[in-house]
Amino acid sequence: MDDFILFHHDKEYLKYCLKKIEEYLKTLKLSLNSKTQIYDIKKGFNFLGYKFFLKGKKLIVLINNQTKKRVKKKLKRLKRKDKEKYALVRASYKGYFMKADTGNFIYKARF
């Protein structure tokens, strides 16, 4: 896996970390991609299909809407064409959704 998030309350410290990470990657002849950014978590950001934001002092993790639509479409298609694979993929998504506050999306969705 090559995706990661670094959280810290001090933006200047995050800039320092970013610089150090870039320096280290340079020694390996690697670089960060152009999407690398420092976000204000209070405004929220999307990462790997999740939406992260702070509500008060609590970190809220949701599944973003685009991911929900993609999952529904895939599961509906599999349910019609391949019932065995459907059950496996649905179980996999259930595990993925357990990391977020999904509002029982996997149970409420009609697929």
Image: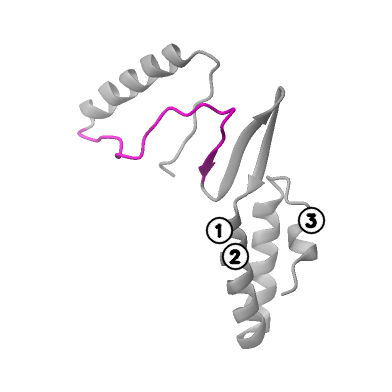
Residue 67: x and y in percent read 57, 58
Position of the C terminus, as image quadrant, is bottom right
Where residue 93 sits, quadrant-wise, is bottom right
Amino acid at circle 1: Gln
Label 1 to label 2, Cα distance in Å?
5 Å
- In the rendered view, tell whether residue 80 sits above or below residue 46: below
Depth check: give the residue in front, 30 or 45.
45
- Left/right placement of residue 109 relative to residue 1 reads right
Residue at point 49% right, 27% down? 6
Would you say residue 38 sits in the magenta stretch?
A: yes
Q: Magenta segment range?
A: 29-47
Q: Which residue is mark 3?
A: 104
Contact? badges 1 and 2 (CB < 8 Å): yes
Q: Earlier in the sequence, mark 3 or mark 2?
A: 2
Q: At numbered mark 1, what does the secondary structure look like: helix, strand or loop?
A: helix
Amino acid at circle 2: Lys
Would you say residue 27 sits in the magenta stretch?
A: no
- Left/right placement of residue 58 relative to residue 77 reads right
Label 3 to label 1, Cα distance in Å?
17 Å
Q: Which residue is mark 2?
A: 69
Q: Earlier in the sequence, mark 3 or mark 1?
A: 1
Q: Which residue is mark 1?
A: 66
- Left/right placement of residue 66 relative to residue 3 reads right
Label 3 to label 2, Cα distance in Å?
15 Å
Q: How would you classify the magenta stretch by its main secondary structure?
A: loop
Q: Badge 2: few (under 14), some or many (20 or more) residues near its Cα, within 10 Å?
A: few
